[in-house]
């Protein structure tokens, strides 16, 4: 199964980046979430909004993509096509990951100042809006450079091959 290309295969304009960040800032405010990250499916960080994490965001982005891909394989093993959201709860910090147009992952980092229910509710609408912005950017990139090959292979394709 061929997955759509990750963010590494298209480029964002300054307007695209500003629009993505505006949507993320609204999400942070509406959900009372500390930080939101967009990560492409190959593990590249697209953008960060809110409180800047104190950890290595590049490593975090890579692990996020791997986590999402591994859980996609778990979903297939139990007869699901995919899990479009993942939730990880810690003692003080939690994170909710949401699939955006099968191209990027929205990661919401939050603490006890909000609830999982509120973050999930607000993430649903934001995922659709981000998806439209990303689709528009991808379409523009493909129109301006139709022969461009992705710089990185698709992580999901590689994991699929491992399980076949």
Image: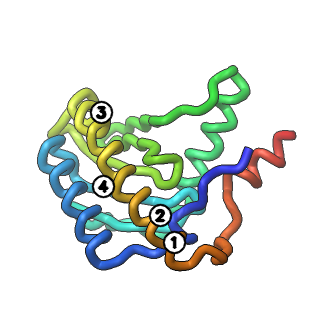
The residue drawn where x is 56% and y is 45% is: 68
Name the quadrant of the C terminus. Answer: top right
The residue drawn where x is 65% and y is 71% is: 150
- Label ID, residue 36: 4
Mark 3 or mark 1, whichever is nearer to me? 1
Q: Quadrant of residue 35?
A: bottom left
- Label ID, residue 139: 2
Dot 4 alpha-carbon crowd within 10 angstroms: few under 14, some 14 to 19, many 20 or more:
many
Q: Quadrant of residue 163?
A: top right
Circle 3/circle 4 CB separation < 8 Å: no
Total residue callouts: 4
- Label ID, residue 2: none
Q: CA distance from mark 3 to mark 1?
A: 34 Å
Q: Label 2, secondary structure: give it.
A: helix
Q: Is residue 51 above or below residue 72?
A: below
Mark 1 or mark 4, whichever is nearer to me? 1
Question: Residue 33 placed where, x, y %?
Answer: 21, 47
Q: Residue furthest right?
A: 164
Q: What residue sits right under mark 1 in the picture?
A: 143
Q: Earlier in the sequence, mark 3 or mark 2?
A: 3
Name the quadrant of the N terminus. Answer: top right
The residue drawn where x is 36% and y is 51% is: 132
Q: Is residue 11 left or right of residue 43?
A: left
Q: Is residue 80 above or below residue 44?
A: above
Q: What residue sits right under mark 3 in the picture?
A: 120
Q: Is residue 55 above or below residue 115?
A: below
């Amino acid at each position: 199964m061929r997955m759509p290309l990750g963010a590494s295969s298209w480029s964002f304009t300054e307007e695209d980046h500003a629009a993505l960040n505006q949507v993320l800032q609204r999400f942070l405010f509406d959900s009372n979430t500390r930080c939101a990250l967009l990560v492409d499916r190959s593990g590249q960080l697209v953008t960060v909004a809110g409180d800047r994490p104190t950890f290595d965001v590049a490593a975090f982005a890579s692990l996020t993509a791997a986590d999402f891909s591994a859980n996609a394989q778990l979903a297939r093993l139990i007869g699901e096509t995919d899990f479009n959201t993942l939730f990880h709860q810690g003692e003080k910090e939690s994170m909710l990951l949401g699939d955006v147009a099968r191209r990027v992952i929205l990661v919401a980092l939050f603490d006890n100042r909000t609830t999982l229910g509120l973050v999930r509710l607000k993430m649903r609408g934001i995922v659709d809006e981000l998806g439209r912005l990303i689709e528009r950017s991808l379409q523009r990139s493909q129109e301006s450079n139709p022969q461009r090959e992705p710089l990185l292979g698709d992580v999901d394709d590689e994991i699929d091959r491992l399980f076949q």
